[in-house]
Image (cartoon, rainbow, N blue to C red):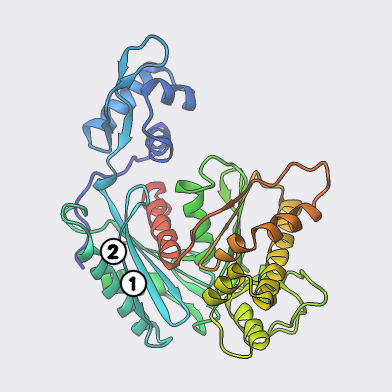
């Protein structure tokens, strides 16, 4: 893949970066709205936006009535097609890729099996998927010269955005994944923990967009937890260990592989639900079938799903009690559990909260593997926009 050449450069810093970033995250916005939001004088804002429009970073969108006197105004927006980014999520046995525009909208998706845990083989799959999603993009979507950057997310920890310090599911320690991807694709590359990447996507372009403090809880192959406080992602060297998966939820619950009874991993993961269903129904049962049976009123399936829903509600309540976020976002490829067991989830949240506590603003976001890959792409957008390297 050739190095990117198309699209205007992003804002350099200071007030110019503030203006461009505000339009990216909140736009389209009128100049008056921008001046008010950023506490800038009209002459200063006019000077900054004039240059940004001239360079093609900002564009004037369709006119709309001014709020005060009905005069037409032309809100400013970003040209979302000026840059595109690849995001790849490495999961157990598979990789999932997306191509997104500058605002994180997915325009193409692809998936592939991973041949094993050899870093060179994994990077080859990442590069092939990057080429595939660019080729799959609708005509005229991607800018000339190819994508601007690539993000890779995985269940692990990368302290510098390049080296995978630890990825238990791949058996990796200190693998220079970002360097390998950059050398193979020719693109600027950034590596991030998968839950942190997904949380970043919700922060900039999703359910956490208007909240300065919010939490993300994911359910699926694992149980994940991300936190944004004062508009900043909370980071820690233990990201990737799945610590929230061992949070205790039921003293009488099943055991997890680490020997913890009734922890989140033992009660909420896809594998745990399928194992319990197989025992109860005496045959292999997928998580999708389990949820369908629960919807249809099967007593064993209904009990398993409602027990898991109560456990999920307790986890949400614990997150709300301990970190006091404005909003809790539930998502992940197993999030349908929160839909089918919605009543059990809400009842458990209420039971574990103080009666006078502010009701939890709980948002259930649809989840799939493309969503995880989108998180990786948004991290690449952030890396480009904020000049983090």
251 over 121 or under it: above or below:
above
- Mark yes or no: residue 389 visible: no
Say which residue label 1 marks.
181
Q: Is residue 155 left or right of residue 253?
A: left
Percent x, y of residue 175: 45, 78
Residue at 42% x, 26% y is: 34
The span from disc 2 to disc 1 (Cα, nearest Å) is 8 Å
Camera-side residue of 110 and 11: 110
Sequence-earlier tag: 2 or 1: 1
Say which residue label 2 marks.
187
20 over 234 or under it: above or below:
above
Percent x, y of residue 99: 31, 60
Residue at 35% x, 52% y is: 105
Residue at 28% x, 56% y is: 148
Percent x, y of residue 28: 36, 32
Camera-side residue of 324 and 290: 290
| Residue sticking out furthest to the front | 297
């Amino acid at each position: 893949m050739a190095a990117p050449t198309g699209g205007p450069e992003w804002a350099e810093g200071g007030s110019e970066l503030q203006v461009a970033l505000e339009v990216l995250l909140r736009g389209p916005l009128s100049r008056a709205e921008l001046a008010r939001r950023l506490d800038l004088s009209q002459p200063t804002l006019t000077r900054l936006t004039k240059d940004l429009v001239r360079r093609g970073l900002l564009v004037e969108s369709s006119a709309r009535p001014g709020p005060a006197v009905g005069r037409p105004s032309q809100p400013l927006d970003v040209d979302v097609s000026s840059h595109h980014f690849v995001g790849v999520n490495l999961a157990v046995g598979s990789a999932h890729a997306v191509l997104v525009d500058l605002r994180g909208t997915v325009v193409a998706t692809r998936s592939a099996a991973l041949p094993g845990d050899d870093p060179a083989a994994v990077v080859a799959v990442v590069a092939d998927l990057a080429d595939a999603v660019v080729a799959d993009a609708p005509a005229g979507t991607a800018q000339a010269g190819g994508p601007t950057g690539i993000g890779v997310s995985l269940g692990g920890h990368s302290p510098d955005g390049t080296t995978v310090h630890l990825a238990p599911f791949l058996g990796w320690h200190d693998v220079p994944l970002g360097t390998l991807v950059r050398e193979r694709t020719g693109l600027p590359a950034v590596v991030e923990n998968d839950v942190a990447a997904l949380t970043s996507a919700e922060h900039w372009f999703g359910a956490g967009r208007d909240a300065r403090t919010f939490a993300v809880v994911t359910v699926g192959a694992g149980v994940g937890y991300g936190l944004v406080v004062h508009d900043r992602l909370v980071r820690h060297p233990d990201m990737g260990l799945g610590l929230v998966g061992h949070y205790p939820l039921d003293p009488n619950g099943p055991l997890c592989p680490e020997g913890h009874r009734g922890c989140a991993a033992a009660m909420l993961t896809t594998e745990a639900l399928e194992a319990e269903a197989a025992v109860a129904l005496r045959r292999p049962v997928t998580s999708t079938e389990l949820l369908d049976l629960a919807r249809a009123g099967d007593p064993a399936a209904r009990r398993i799903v409602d027990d898991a829903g109560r456990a999920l509600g307790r986890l949400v309540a614990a997150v709300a009690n301990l970190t006091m976020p404005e909003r809790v976002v539930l998502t992940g490829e197993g999030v349908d559990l929160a839909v089918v067991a919605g009543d059990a989830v809400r009842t458990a949240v209420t039971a574990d909260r103080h009666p006078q506590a502010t009701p939890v603003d709980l948002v259930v976001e649809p989840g799939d593997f493309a969503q995880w890959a989108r998180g990786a792409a948004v991290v690449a957008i952030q890396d480009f926009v904020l000049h983090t390297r």
